[in-house]
Image (cartoon, grey):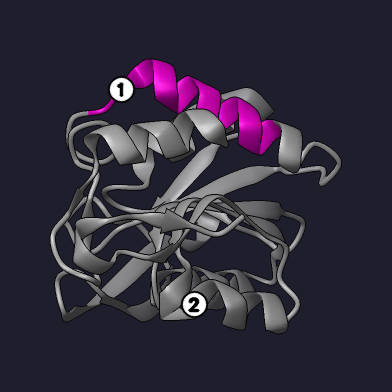
Amino acid sequence: MDLLKERILRDGRVKDEQIIKVDGFLNHQIDICLMDEIAKEFRRLFADEKITKVITIEASGIAIACFTALQFQVPLVFAKKSESKNIDGEVYRTTVTSFTKGRDYTVILEQRYLSPGDRILIIDDILATGKAQKGLLDIARQAGAEVAGIGVVIEKGFQGGGDALRKAGYNIQSLAIIDSMKDGTVKFRN
């Protein structure tokens, strides 16, 4: 997606060879016009998948997933990173490791929001090693839901998560795949 790549080159900041900051337009301050275009692209890419729900993990994926769920006219469900008093009933539970934060989270999703009849689209802002996506895949497995696809805004291709998930047979569509970030320069996969 050229619009996204241009925005990454213009406003993204390479922190080191492993981390790119896109918080000025994607996951802290959000450019809603760009989000709308991203969601339309996910709608186009997964148009034939009969999506019944969009799922993500809080917090950075929620905005993108909201716009995407709106395009599909389906509910958005997000896995929470912490227990709270308003969690009601049985939950699906899994552990994910955040690459950027370097810590494990137990994420939960109430069972009443995901069921065996669902065809889900997993949406996330960044794919690095694939651990967040694997956590959501585990929740889908627990629920008996079918994963119709995984939509990622930015994949750091050099970290291997996307390639491993593709090799496992998942339909992953990444809008921008970064091959390297050496010397502060972003290079995209063609």
Query: Is disc 2 placed on a helix, strand or loop?
Result: helix
Q: In this view, does 85 lie above or below 175?
A: below
User: Which residue is identified by label 2?
Assistant: 161
User: Taking the image as drawn, is residue 142 in sight?
Assistant: no
- Amino acid beneath label 2: Gly
Q: Is 19 rendered above or below residue 10? A: below
> Which residue is tagged 1?
31
Image location of residue 82, percent across then percent down: 20, 64
Residue 14 x/y as whole percent: 19, 56
The residue at the point 55 percent across, 59 percent down is: 189
User: Split into 4 quadrants, where in the image is the C terminus?
Assistant: bottom right
Q: In this view, does 183 lie above or below 117?
A: below
Q: In this view, does 47 lie to the left or right of 103?
A: right
Q: Which residue is drawn at 27% across and 68% down?
A: 182
Q: In this view, does 103 lie above or below 117?
A: below
Coordinates of residue 142 in the picture (x, y in percent): 58, 77
Give the residue drawn at x 23%, y 34%. 11
Query: Which region is colored magenta?
Result: 30-43
Please state, as top left, top right, bottom left or bottom right, where the N terminus lies in the image.
top right
Taking the image as shown, residue 85 lies to the left or right of residue 151, namely left
